Image: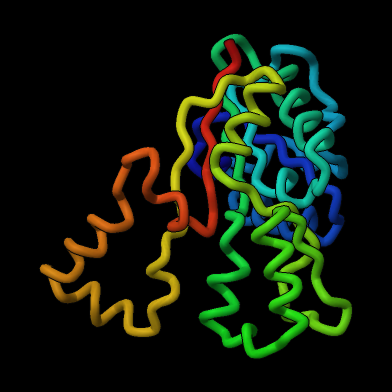
Amino acid sequence: MAGCGWHDVHQIDPVENLLEVAREISAAQPASPITSITLGEARALPYADGSADAVLLFGPLYHLTQRTARVEALREACRVLRSSGVVVAIGISRFSSALDGLLRRFIDDDAFIDMMTRDLAEGQHRRLAEQATYFTTAYLHLPDELEAEANDAGPQAEETLAIQGPTWLLSDFEERWADEAHRARMMDICSDSKPNHRRWVPVVIWLVARKP
């Protein structure tokens, strides 16, 4: 975003290695660097009330496994926003581990099945200590849950979007995409906007909410 030159961009992350990557990216674009790069976390933003046009939560909500902590992060985002400011937050779908298990045959592992069953029932994903290839400890949302957490925190949910749909499962995606008629049918399936559909489709959920 900083590279577009549209806004002053301030980045916060609790992981020093990721901050170092941000510093390298910022240094590579001297005409429009990242304004500040700070070690910190989403529940304690070092900014004044009403000082931001937008807050992007690209990670903390699925790393915070307790609802109270996620609502706290969203409330803090709302605090620093100006009136009518926007929060954009990413969640990981409740069904993501099941889809990944199908794709990569993790479902052949009985321990994975136990983990996946808990994921689907509770959303509480816990990586097995002996399986570093599995996704890290996280909370996996249903779309309605993410909306409710934002509404409880202050910013009111406006839209929930499917960012990564089921076509990532297709090993022959490029061939299918080149077939114009088949591409149109795939797009119809993935873009169905009826409220009771599309709920299984996303792996990544994108929430847009606005401060009243």
Q: Is residue 204 visible?
A: yes
Say whether residue 197 is left or right of residue 30.
left
Q: Position of residue 158 (x, y in %)?
A: 48, 25
Q: Is residue 134 above or below residue 26?
A: below
Q: Position of residue 185 (x, y in %)?
A: 19, 63
Q: Residue at x 53, y 59 (%)?
A: 203
Q: Is residue 169 above or below residue 189?
A: below
Say whether residue 138 is left or right of residue 28.
right
Q: Nearer the viewer, residue 77 or 199?
A: 199
Q: Is residue 106 above or below residue 78?
A: below
Q: Nearer the viewer, residue 30 or 204?
A: 204
Q: Quadrant of the C terminus?
A: top right
Q: Residue at x 57, y 35 (%)?
A: 88
Q: Position of residue 55 (x, y in %)?
A: 64, 30
Q: Residue at x 77, y 66 (%)?
A: 136
Q: Position of residue 130 (x, y in %)?
A: 86, 84
Q: Is residue 126 above or below residue 148?
A: below
